[in-house]
Structure formats: C-alpha cells, structure tokens
Image (spheres, grey):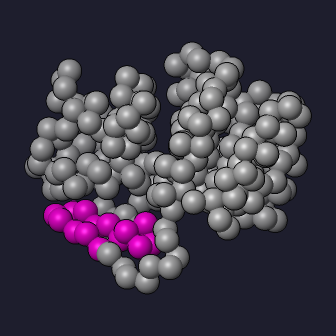
Amino acid sequence: MGANRKILVVDDEPQITRVLRHSLMAHRFDVRTAADGVSALDTFRDWHPDLVITDLQMPDMNGIELCGEIRKSSQVPVIVLSVKGEERTKVEALDAGADDYVTKPFGIDELLARVRAALRRLPDESEGVETKLADGLIAIDLDTREVSVDGEIVHLTPKEFELFVFLFHNRGKVVTHRAILSAVWGGNSTEQTEYLRVFVGQLRKKIEKDPAKPQFIRTEPWVGYRFSTSIG
C-alpha cells in the first residue's frame, strides 16, 4: 500500500516524528518530517506529498493555519493530531480543511488505518478509464474528482468529495448518521457525529444557493440525511 506514496509528518515533538517516520517507512511509505508549520509548508510546496499528518499545537504556524495554507493550492488529504479532544477543536480543524482527526495518545495501527483509508481515495494513475456520473443538476467525474452543480464547478476537499459521492449513490434514500459515518470515516467513527455535521455544513455552503434552506442535502431529524439531485 505504501509503495511510492509520500507522507509529510509535521510535529514539534521529535519523539513523535521519529516514531511516525519509522512506522510509516516500515510500511513502505516515503516520509519526510518537519518541526513547524512554516518549514512544513516549504517542504509541501517542494516535495508534493500524497498525504500530510500534522500536529495542531506548533510554534510560528499551527496545524490549523498550515491546513488552511495547504487548502489554498491542494486537495491532498490532511490528518490532524492533537492532545485536545474537545469538539470545538475538532470543528476548527475540519473547518480549516482537515480530512480526519486523531486524538493523542493514539495507536499506530489506528493511524495507519486512517492513512490507508485516506490514500485509497486518491485517484489511481494506473487507471485510464474516466468515470462520469450525472443526475438532475449534479455531475461528477470520478477520474478527475470534479463536481458540478447546475453547470458550475464546485471545489471539494477529498473528504467532502467522498461524502458527496456516497450521498449521490444513495440519492432519494434516507441514509442514517451511522451508515454515513461508517462508509466515509470507517467503522470506528460511527459515534463521531460532529465529523458528519461539520462536513454536511461545508457541503451545503458550497452547493446550496441558501445553506439555511438546503434543497440538495436534506436533514431527516434524528435519523440522518436524504440527498436530492434536483431542486424542488
């Protein structure tokens, strides 16, 4: 899985970067490390990693700021690490464009599973077949990961794209919170409804004319969401 995949690890604790570097390299990932957000951003721009793992609390530029800078030019998956478990901090990281959130202390096996899941969502350059989906006002190109709504291109992060495609595949159906979380974030995340709430909010801002009165992603109170491909 890790062959030829490049991962940038950012943390100001040397022991953390050392452990992650050795663990990831043991699984055949190409790894570079940085001790702060500023140097990490320089490495990111020069090296073009496939995935970034970053701590939140760092000098000069913290993980949330780094994530925001990365999102200005790239949709590469970002996994955020932090000792903080409060929902507010998670929401701030996800709002900044992070794709996943792992609270310290964490198990290496768990982190590796999150890494593999994030990388599986990247386009496979060996596959030359372009896959397109369309229904109503929605069009999705799975090869280029491009989404358009009523003819307008919508720029989505990797996690937003995965959520959007999952809802599209289940259009017209009521999909439970647990089913969405399991499909998009994995079986260990079925209770982390704050992930889903944040990302649905982000999607609505990007695809709805009035996010306060959504027409595409409709809430089914206490149950989940129902996705419609047309307004009305």
The image quadrant of residue 109 is top right
Residue at 32%, 75% (x, y): give it: 131
On the image, the x and y values in percent for residue 189 come to 42, 30
Name which residue lies at 63% across and 59% down. 2
Q: Nearer the viewer, residue 129 or 200?
A: 129
Measured as percent of width and height from the top left, residue 160 is found at: 43, 49
At which x and y percent is residue 118?
52, 50
Q: Is residue 200 left or right of residue 30?
A: left
Q: Is residue 141 left or right of residue 168?
A: right
Nearest the eye: 163 or 50: 50
Q: Is residue 195 magenta?
A: no
Q: Nearer the viewer, residue 127 or 208?
A: 127
Q: Is residue 95 left or right of residue 217?
A: right
Figure label count: 0
Residue 70 visible somewhere in the drawing: no
Per the rendered image, the range of residues in magenta is 132-145
Which quarter of the figure has residue 45? bottom right
Q: What residue occupies the far top of the structure in this picture?
A: 86
Which residue is farthest bottom? 128
Residue 134: say if magenta: yes
Give coordinates of residue 10: x percent, y percent: 78, 42
Looking at the picture, tell me which residue is in the foreground, 220 or 23.
23
Q: Does residue 170 show up? A: yes
The residue positioned 79% from the left and 45% from the top of the image is 22
In which quadrant will I find the N terminus? bottom right
Residue found at the very far front of the displayed protein: 26
Give the quarter of the image for residue 47: bottom right
